[in-house]
Amino acid sequence: MTPEQNDTNAEPSLETELLGMKMRTPLIMASGTFGYAFEIARVADLDFSHIGAVILKSVTLEPRQGNPPPRVAETPAGMLNSVGLQNPGVDYVIRHYLGMLENFDTNFIASVAGHTVHEYVECSVKMASHESIRAVELNMSCPNVRDGRRFASDPAGAAALIRAVKERCPKPIIAKLAPGTEDVGEIAGACIDAGADALSAGNTYVGMVIDTRRRRPLLGGNTGGLSGPAIRPLAVHNVCLVHQVASQKNIPVIGCGGVMTGNDAAEMMLAGACAVQVGTAVFTNVHIAADISAGLRKYLVAQKENEVSAIVGTLQQNETS
Amino acid sequence: MSERKRTGPFDIIATVVAQEPAGSAAYRLTLDCPEIARCAKPPQFFTISCHALSQIHAGADADSVPLDPILRRPLGFYRVRPDKGEFDTIYQVVGRGTGMLTLLKPGDRVRVLGPLGKNINPKDIRSRTALLVGGGAGLPPLCYLSEALQDAGKEIIVIAGARYRELLIAPTVSRRLKRPVGGRKDVQSLEPLAQRDIDCAIALERHEEGFFEGLITAPLEEYLELDYEGGVEIVACGPPPMVRVIAKLAEKKSVKCTVVMESRMGCAIGACQTCVIKTTSGYRRVCVEGPVFDAKDIVWE
Ligand SMILES: Cc1cc2nc3c(=O)[nH]c(=O)nc-3n(C[C@H](O)[C@H](O)[C@H](O)COP(=O)(O)OP(=O)(O)OC[C@H]3O[C@@H](n4cnc5c(N)ncnc54)[C@H](O)[C@@H]3O)c2cc1C
Ligand SMILES: Cc1cc2nc3c(=O)[nH]c(=O)nc-3n(C[C@H](O)[C@H](O)[C@H](O)COP(=O)(O)O)c2cc1C
Ligand code: FES
């Protein structure tokens, strides 16, 4: 084999490091679409080796019964969900679910939601105290509960929340920002200054589907969060905006929204994401992380890159006059 | 391979063996998928992508992922042939996704997830006789269930409802009822049930010779009047309004009723909490805690 051949045949590495976690790929399963991992792990031959990390379904301090059904409405190239944070509460999740995580060979990140700063803090501390949890994502942007987005739409509120959690939480924290706010850069800056260790950009967009025959919203909760490939261009732009701010402070950005293929993941990473969340895509194929990894490797080969981290934030904007 | 792995569920690529019309706006789709065929039990279900994979599977290339519609459709099993590694489903065309399924042709490859949900084990049916009652898309899974229960030694009577004859999912043949009701002896039966010597009473809303006239509850009420040695109970599967009416009638007559429920799904594997229905013990996921429920646990809206 000539050295040249060797070069082009070398399998590019997808390994990355995020918040002290060694990840075999930059792919992170998004909160709410992968449950608490054990549900999907029932599928035969599920291979965690393509999954860099899993963010567990958001938990709250008290159990939540969630919104009335229907909770899902399909939309062009996407879907609305209105689950309303149904979960059995943080104590139940810790007692019954977290113990199973050690059977799955990947990193786990908790996701926490709440109505008050106190709720976020207590919940984060409880989840972060478990040995299987490597970091905590604060879901500051859930569109399906009343005032769910409050913390992500006001820089002062966001900062106060991050500061309070940071003070007590023993593990790194990730702020999950709401997309589609004009001033996402300002909020991102406020979160970083308050001590966020990483930023997730972003979440679902609020939408509605109307059942014209019944003249009512199709979803039991009236509105829902739009996810899937329909939001990808919005999400990529959102990552660009957040990256502009975060790169100045050396804070990692996790891209999220509509990723289905290796090329989609590459878009997110070029825009500045050092890791990429995969949510709705898992509904089309629970093994999708394997396909996305293969696609990302193919992209790196075509670009003559040896390591996935080399492409992060390398987007060249076109000159405009 | 461990026991768990062999019973799935599997997220896997199936190959289309055949597709043919089955009644008006309904199709029978035969898939080659040994993993699922080996362990699918009635009335479990599977989900199917509305898109065939491109012929040359391009791995992670954009053309091999479904963009629109994005969600897989839940469908029941009609016939399962574990020895051949094949199974059949019958689906009604009701919207865009099922419309796209009609385009699948032999040789196409399509992503499926299954078998999913709880099945009805013959020993869950305590009575000697089971009245399997349903209509529309609920009939194919009921046919499969009737065979499994009959094989386990149960007496089976199927009561099927439709608005008009063309909506039935299988050809009909004339047959004598073993347990006649309403003064009727000779009636039409669904062909697969006739082959198995299973009594079948079909109610059509439109008058037609050889059928019971009216809603499905008409023959059901008459069957509930008969005496059954070893007891009788109901399994209902079909459009939600029909299932609800059957459940109400069962409650009035104090007959045990098991219902097979439908709901809109995201993951179909218990992770996303979108497919819930209201029960007396809170919201329950149809995809893993169902689709089989005891009718008395459902809070009917
Ligand atoms: C457990 C189960 C078993 C089923 N078995 C069968 C079967 O054997 N044969 C058959 O013909 N149909 C069956 N159905 C119903 C079938 O899933 C729907 O008719 C189908 O999803 C409609 O898709 P569409 O794109 O044509 O309709 P659209 O209305 O365009 O679909 C839009 C969205 O709503 C969902 N949806 C619409 N109607 C239903 C429904 N009744 N149940 C669940 N989701 C729905 C679709 O999946 C899709 O996500 C079953 C449903 C469930 C839940
Ligand atoms: C059914 C469903 C449930 C979700 N639940 C949560 C949740 O509990 N917490 C959260 O932070 N995000 C939740 N999300 C949002 C996803 O984590 C993700 O941010 C969003 O779906 C966009 O990514 P995608 O297009 O790859 O799905 C949910 C999304 C879906 C589709
Ligand atoms: S469809 Fe996701 S939990 Fe049932």
Image (cartoon, rainbow, N blue to C red):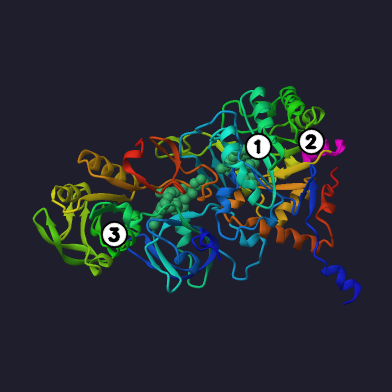
Label 2 packing within 10 angstroms: few (<14), some (14-19), many (20+): many
* Residue A85, picture quadrant: top right
Determine whether A42 is above or below B194 in the image.
Answer: above
Q: Amino acid at mark 3?
A: Leu
Pinpoint residue B116: horizontal percent, then vertical percent: 46, 55
Pinpoint residue B98: horizontal percent, then vertical percent: 45, 57
Q: Magenta residues? A: A240-250
Tell me the number on the disc at residue B280: none
Q: Nearer the viewer, residue A315 or A261?
A: A261
Pinpoint residue B10: horizontal percent, then vertical percent: 53, 60
Q: Which residue is mark 2?
A: A197
Magenta span includes A245: yes
At a point 63% along the width and 68% down the height, the residue shown is B57
Magenta span includes B241: no
Q: Which residue is mark 3?
A: B168
Q: Which residue is mark 1?
A: A111
Q: Give the CA distance from mark 1 to mark 3.
A: 48 Å
Instruction: Say which chain tag 3 marks.
Output: B
Q: Amino acid at mark 2?
A: Asp
At a point 44% along the width and 70% down the height, the residue shown is B86
